[in-house]
Image (cartoon, rainbow, N blue to C red):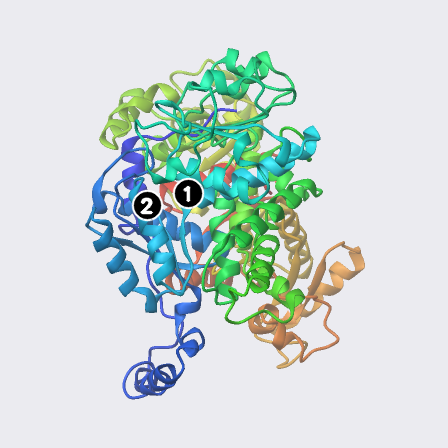
Amino acid sequence: MPNPKFSREEALAFHLEPTPGKFEVTATVPMTTQRDLSLAYSPGVAVPCEEIARNHELAYDYTNKGNLVAVISNGTAVLGLGNLGALGSKPVMEGKAVLFKRFADVNSIDIELDTEDPEDFIKAVRLMGPTFGGINLEDIKAPECFIIEQTLKEQMDIPVFHDDQHGTAVICAAGLINALHLSGKKIEDCRIVLNGAGAAGIACIELLKSMGARHENCIACDTKGVIYQGRQDGMNQWKSAHAVSTELRTLEEAMKDADVFLGVSVKGAVTQDMVKSMAPDPVIFAMANPDPEITPEDAHEVRPDAIVATGRSDYPNQVNNVLGFPYLFRGALDVHARAINDEMKIACAHALARLAREDVPDEVAIAYGRKLSFGRDYIIPTPFDPRLIHTIPPAVARACMDTGAARRPIVDMDAYELALKSRLDPTASIMRSINARARNAQARMIFAEGDDPRVLRAAVQYTRTGFGHAVVVGRDEDVKQKLEAAGLGDAFDEIEITNAAKTEHLEEYKSFLYGKLQRRGFDQQDIHRLAARDRHVFSALMLAHGHGDGLVTGATRKSAHVLDRINHVFDADAEHGAVGVTTLLHKGRIVMITDTLVHEWPDEEDLANIAERAADVARGLGIEPRVAFVSFSTFGYPRSERAEKMHRAPMVLEARGVDFEFEGEMTVDVALNKAAQDYYPFQRLTGPANILVVPARHSASISTKLMQEMAGATVIGPILAGIDKSIQICSSTSTASDILNMAVLAACKVG
C-alpha cells in the first residue's frame, strides 16, 4: 500500500486554511447577556478568586487548571530538524497541543520560550506553574533537557514530563514486555544494547532498569562507541551513570549474543551481520526517524526469528509516543497529580502491553484493513484503538494514588472508566475507518470537473494519500496550468486526464445513452452533445461502463442540475429509490438528515424507504442506526394534517419488520435529547437518534445549511444512496477537503 505524500504547498495550505494555525480558544460558558459578563468577570469573578486564595486546591474546581497542559519548547531539537529556534518550533508545538485534545480530551496550549539558557527556561516555566495542571516539555536538546526537567520536577508541584525522553521510553517498554513474553525471556536475564545515548535513549535504559533490567547487562553506545567505565571522551554525568565495566568497545562487538537492541540513533547504524550475531529470538527496536537503524525486511532476511519494531507507521509495531503522553496526562490530571513518577510510567507500559494481548475490536481491524492479533507483528496497540482512552488513564491514576502523588484520589474507578469512554470523539474513528477502507479498496475514482482547482487538488490528494488512482475529466493544458497555479505542477503525471476527444469509447457511450433516452425525446445530435460535451454525463457513462469504480461531481453546478444529468445514465430518482443523506459532524456528535437531495415531498411509504436507505448509509459508516421521524409534533400533539405522514411512517417500518431502532413522530429536541426522551417512557429509542427523517426536502436543506452556517458543523454529503453504482455529489461550496471526503465515501461504496 503506498505511503501518503504531500507537497510543501499542501503542507503550507493545511496550516494556513481556513485560519492560520491548528487550534482556537472557545468559551465554555455563555457570554451573551450583561448578567453573563458580570458572572464571568467583574464583579462575580471575585467570589471564586477569594475561595482559591484561601484554598489553592479549589483552582481545580473553579478554573480550567485541572484539564490544561502547557507544551513548552525552546526549539533546540525539533523533530530531527535540529535547532530551529523557539518560533520555528511553534507549528510542532501546536500539533502536539491538538494531539492532546484529539486523543485524550486534554486542553493544551503551546508556549515557545526564546532562550537557550537552562536557568532562564527553568525560571520562566516555574513562574507559569499556577496556570497549568501539567507541563509537557518538548524538543529540547540534550544535555540541557535533563537539567531542565530534573530541576522543574524538584521545584514544581504539578507533573513535568519531557516526552522526547519518557514518552519513547514508555512505549518502548510496553513493546519489550510483550516481545519478551513471546520469546519466553525475562528482562533481568536479557543482554540489552542501546545505541544513541541522548534524551530518549537514556530515558529508555533508565526505565527498563526500573523494571528489572540489570545494570551490568545493559550496554549503552554513542557515536564514539561503548560507554564503559573509565571512558573520558564525549562523556557527561548522564552517560556516566550507565557506564559498565566491559572490554567491549564498538556497537558491533556489543551486539554479539545480545537479546535486545534499542536504537534511537541514525539510519543504517545496524548491519545484517550485527543482527546475525544476536541471541535467539532477538528483539530489535530500530526507532530512528524517519528511517530506522535497520529495516524490518533486512533484519528478517538474516534472522526470521527477530521481533522488530520501528518508529514508522508503514511497518508493524510502531513505537508511537501518541500511545503514551495523552493518556499519562489524562490519568495524572484526573487525580490532580503532583508528579508523573516511574511507577505511573511503568503502569502505563504494562497497561499498553496488556491491551495488545487482548482481542482486537472489529472497528480497529477495519480501520487498518487487516485482522490484528497478538504476535510478533503486533506487540504494541495501534494509536487509533478506541480502548486506549479508558484503559491507560485508570492504570496511571491507580499508580499515582498508590504512590501518594495524587491530591484527589478517584473513589469509583468503574464510574471513572465510563466517563472516559464518553470523552472519545466518535467522528474521528468513523472518518479514520472509512479512510482505511478506501486505501484498501484502491478504487479508480472519476473526478468529473477537471477545470476546477478544488477538484484538482482533491484528485491529487486522493492519489497522494494512497486511496487509489484519480481520473480527471478535463483538457490536458487546462489541467496542467491550474495545477501549476496551485503549486502542484509536479502532480500532473500522477493523475490520469481524460475527455471525450481522448477516449476510444465515445461511440460505445453514445450507443448506450441513445438506448436509454431515445424514447424520452432525444435524437442522435442531442446524444452526441450530451456524451461529448457534458462532463457530468460523460463521467457517468465512464462509470456505467466500468471505466472507473466511483464518481465525484457537483462542485461547479447545483446538485439538482447534476442529479438531472446523472439520471440520463442511471436511475437516480425517487421512483427508483434514490435518496440523499447528509451527515453532520458537530462537537463529537454525528447526525444524518434525510432526504436532502431527491424526494421533494415524500409520503409515508417514501419516508420509510428513506429511513431504510439512511440506515444502510449509517451502517456503511460503522454507526448503528437510530431513526427518528421528526416534525413539529410529538406523538400526536399538537395534531396537524402536516404531521400525519410522519406519524404513519413508523407504522410502515413496523409492518416491514426492519432490524434497526426507529420512532416518531417527534420534535427534534426529543429525538436528540435523552432527558427529553425520558418524558415518553413508551418510546422505542435507546438513546439519541442519529438519523433524522424530515418531512420534505426543503426542511432537510434548511436544517443542514443552518447547522453549517450557525453552528459550524462539518457537512458531508449529500451522500447519494440507493443506486447500483458509487456516485457522490458535492456541494458547490465544497472545499478540496470536502471533495476528497466525498471521493473516499465513493471508494468505500457508502450508500
Tell me where residue 225 sits by quadrant. Answer: top left
Look at the image and tell me whether residue 343 can be seen: yes
Q: Amino acid at mark 2?
A: Cys
In the rendered image, the vertical position of residue 516 relative to residue 275, given as above or below: below
Residue nearest the observer in this picture, 217 or 601: 217
Q: Is residue 241 left or right of residue 382?
A: left
> Residue 377 at x, y = what percent?
62, 29
- Asked if 319 appears above or below 479 in the picture, the reply is below
Above or below, 529 relative to 420: above
| Nearer the observer, 117 or 327 | 117
Q: Which mark is residue 584?
A: none
| Tag 2 residue | 145
**Mark 2 vs 1: CB contact within 8 A:** yes
In the image, 691: left or right of 99? right
Q: Is residue 684 above or below residue 595?
A: below
Which image quarter is the C terminus in?
Answer: top right
Label 1 sits on residue: 165
Question: Which secondary structure, mark 2?
Answer: helix
- The CA distance from mark 2 to mark 1 is 9 Å
Q: Position of residue 621 (x, y in %)?
A: 60, 46
Depth check: give the residue in front, 18 or 562: 18
Amino acid type at circle 1 is Gln
Identify the image quadrant of residue 145: top left
- 178 or 701, which lies in front? 178
Which callout, 2 or 1, points at the residue further toward the start of the chain? Answer: 2
Instruction: For residue 475, say whether it is visible.
Output: no
Q: Position of residue 635 (x, y in %)?
A: 68, 76
